[in-house]
């Protein structure tokens, strides 16, 4: 990385100009890399640029102030690292939404993008659907509870709540919830029922943070 980025002048503060310079900076130099691979990387970076610009445009931002620039450059480098690694497009859209949202915050930290990447990397749309539905059921439980205490949701409950699924999909939901728990997006809770111990899940801090971000994203 040669780190020769635009100086923070009025002309260089354009989001597209900054991202274009980043892509040029990230493209590998030299003749050792296969030209087809270089073309693939360039297409991937351009796709990432399109996703990021689109999310930022939703915030009504086209040019950056100095404080925004200080956040945007390192945060976008982290974003493009995920692009380079072939991250799924719907996950890239979520990361881009985080960056766009953070541009409106005074104390935003670029490292949040890296943390979010670690939590979400590689999650399928089905796994995100299970995540959303689990939290929706947890919210419904809390509203219906006289104590207001947090409840728990099993794979059976989620399978029943998603119209497109049948009883045969319960194993898929169990696997999705286990993965989400391993990412700290759900909190595992074991409940004894009739001598058995079906796994159920409750809220987690990271899960609530990610849920808030997903609710603010209207990409679907």
Image: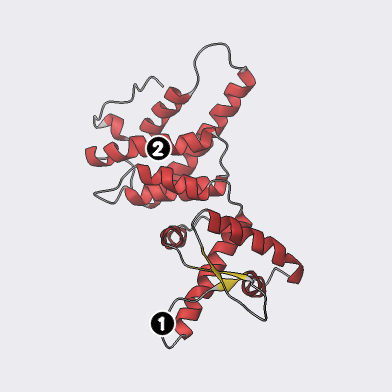
Q: Residue furthest front?
A: 195
Task: Determine which of the numbered discs, if any, sits on residue 148 in the image.
Answer: 1
Say which element carries label 2. helix
| Residue 201, percent from left and from top | 54, 68
Say which element carries label 1. loop
Q: Residue furthest bottom?
A: 146
At 46% from the left and 57% from the top, the residue drawn is: 217
If the image is split into quadrants, where does the N terminus sit?
top left
Q: In the drawing, does residue 196 fall left or right of residue 123?
A: right
At 36% from the left and 42% from the top, the residue drawn is: 111
| Residue 95, percent from left and from top | 45, 47
Res 163 visible: yes
Front in this rendered view, residue 99 or 10: 99
The relative height of residue 9 versus residue 28 in the rendered view (above or below) is below
Q: Name the residue that disc number 2 marks.
A: 76
At 64% from the left and 79% from the top, the residue drawn is: 193
Front in this rendered view, residue 15 or 48: 48
Characterize the local packing of mark 2: few (<14), some (14-19) or many (20 or more) Cα atoms within 10 angstroms. many
> Which marked residue is nearer to the observer: mark 2 or mark 1?
1
Front in this rendered view, residue 123 or 79: 123
The relative height of residue 200 versus residue 103 in the rendered view (above or below) is below
Q: In the drawing, does residue 114 fall left or right of residue 33?
A: left
Q: How many marks?
A: 2
| Residue 212, percent from left and from top | 42, 62
Characterize the local packing of mark 1: few (<14), some (14-19) or many (20 or more) Cα atoms within 10 angstroms. few
If the image is split into quadrants, where does the C terminus sit?
bottom right
The relative height of residue 59 versus residue 133 in the rendered view (above or below) is above
Res 220 visible: no
């Amino acid at each position: 990385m040669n780190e020769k980025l635009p100086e923070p002048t009025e002309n260089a503060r354009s989001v597209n100009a900054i991202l274009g310079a980043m892509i040029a900076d990230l493209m590998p130099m030299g003749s050792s890399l296969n030209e087809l691979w270089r073309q693939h990387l360039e297409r991937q970076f351009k796709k990432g640029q399109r996703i990021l610009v689109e999310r930022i445009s939703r915030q009504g931002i086209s040019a950056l102030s100095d404080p925004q620039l200080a956040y945007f450059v390192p945060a976008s480098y982290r974003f493009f690292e995920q692009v380079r690694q072939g991250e799924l497009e719907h996950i890239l859209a979520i990361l881009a939404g985080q960056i766009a949202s953070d541009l409106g915050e005074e104390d935003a930290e670029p490292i949040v993008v890296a943390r979010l990447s670690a939590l979400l990397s590689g999650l399928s749309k089905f796994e995100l659907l299970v995540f959303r539905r689990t939290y929706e059921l947890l919210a419904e439980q809390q509203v219906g509870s006289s104590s207001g205490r947090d409840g728990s949701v099993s794979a059976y409950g989620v399978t029943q709540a998603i119209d497109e699924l049948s009883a045969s999909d319960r194993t898929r939901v169990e696997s999705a919830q286990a993965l989400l728990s391993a990412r700290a997006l759900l909190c595992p809770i074991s409940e004894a029922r009739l001598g058995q111990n079906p796994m159920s899940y409750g809220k987690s801090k990271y899960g609530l943070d990610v849920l808030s971000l997903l609710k603010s994203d209207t990409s679907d």
